[in-house]
Image (tube, rainbow, N blue to C red):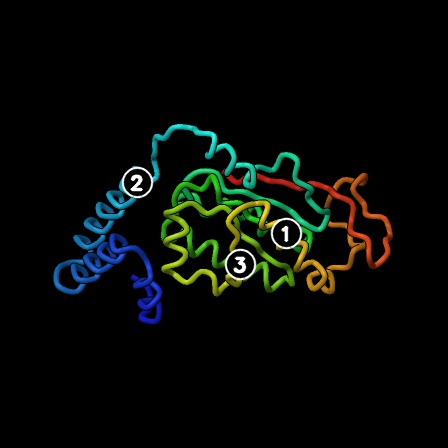
Amino acid sequence: MGEWREIPELLKLSRMEIATWLATFLLTVFADLTVAVEVGMILAVLVFIRKVTQTTTVSEVTEEYVREGHVHILQHKVIPAYVSIFRIHGPFLFGATDKIDEITTRLSSLPPILILRLRNMTAIDSTGLQALESLADQVHESGRELILCGAREQPSRLMHQAEFQHHIGPENMCNSIAEALNRARAVYPEASKHHPVGTIWGRRSTDVLEPESEAAAPEPSATYKEIT
């Protein structure tokens, strides 16, 4: 059921998740633990189905949609060498959160700024949110910056309710990859104090940065990884 100190965090989640937790808690107290677990599992499955169905949409592709999508695509974007981009593809729910280890296990060899694209993350639950919070804390402990971008309606709403912005700062939650890259350029001077320009960040030998003047920026070198 969790610790008492976790209750305020649970109350920041969606109404369906709060209702599931409350029903399981009350059944544990007034009925039987076995019954509570069974009912809780059933309710959790129903919540999962509802979350997935709510993120399914059918809409027409219009000129406005194509025009607005330009800021979200990576093609023709200059990705600096001090940035690594990851993305989550599909629902980020309780059965898939361990895949975030793709980032955490390589953290020590990654550049000073990480961008996590959420445009293709169709849904998230409390477990997925906790995984992102843990990732943000680990990134910051390593002296790096984490920038999130492109969150869709359901993930964006849940992260706002849970006050996720306090983990990375509201200015590091961007609407698009274009905005996230601009933010990365703005925070790089501070981030470079922990990770000097000459550092090799686990790239190919051809990606090693050359010495540069203070006014010059590192040569573009795209690093991109998908989490599915």
Q: Give the residue displayed 42% in from the left and 45% down from the top.
A: 152
- Mark 1 packing: few (<14 Cα in 10 Å), some, or many (20+)? few
Instruction: Quote the CA–CA distance across marks 3 and 1.
Output: 20 Å
State the residue position of label 2: 54
Going from N to C along the chain, the mark reached first, 3 or 1, is 3
- The x, y position of residue 212, in whole percent, is 85, 53
Nearer to me, 109 or 84: 84
Which mark is drawn over residue 182? 1
- The x, y position of residue 172, in whole percent, is 55, 58
Element on which disc 3 rests: helix
Is 203 positioned to the left or the right of 124 in the image? right
Instruction: Quote the CA–CA distance across marks 1 and 2.
Output: 32 Å
Q: Give the residue displayed 35% in from the left and 65% down from the top.
A: 9
Among the 4 quarters of the image, the one containing residue 1: bottom left
- Mark 3 packing: few (<14 Cα in 10 Å), some, or many (20+)? many
- Mark 2 packing: few (<14 Cα in 10 Å), some, or many (20+)? few
* 3 or 1: mark nearer the eye: 1
- The x, y position of residue 226, in whole percent, is 56, 39
Element on which disc 2 rests: helix
Q: Residue furthest bottom?
A: 5
Q: Is residue 160 above or below residue 57?
A: below
Q: Give the residue displayed 38% in from the left and 44% down from the top.
A: 123
Instruction: Quote the CA–CA distance across marks 3 and 2.
Output: 27 Å
Q: Amino acid at mark 3?
A: Ala
* 1 or 2: mark nearer the eye: 1
Q: Amino acid at mark 1?
A: Asn
Going from N to C along the chain, the mark reached first, 3 or 2, is 2
Among the 4 quarters of the image, the one containing residue 163: bottom left
State how many labels appear: 3
Q: Is residue 211 above or below residue 58?
A: below
State the residue position of label 3: 136
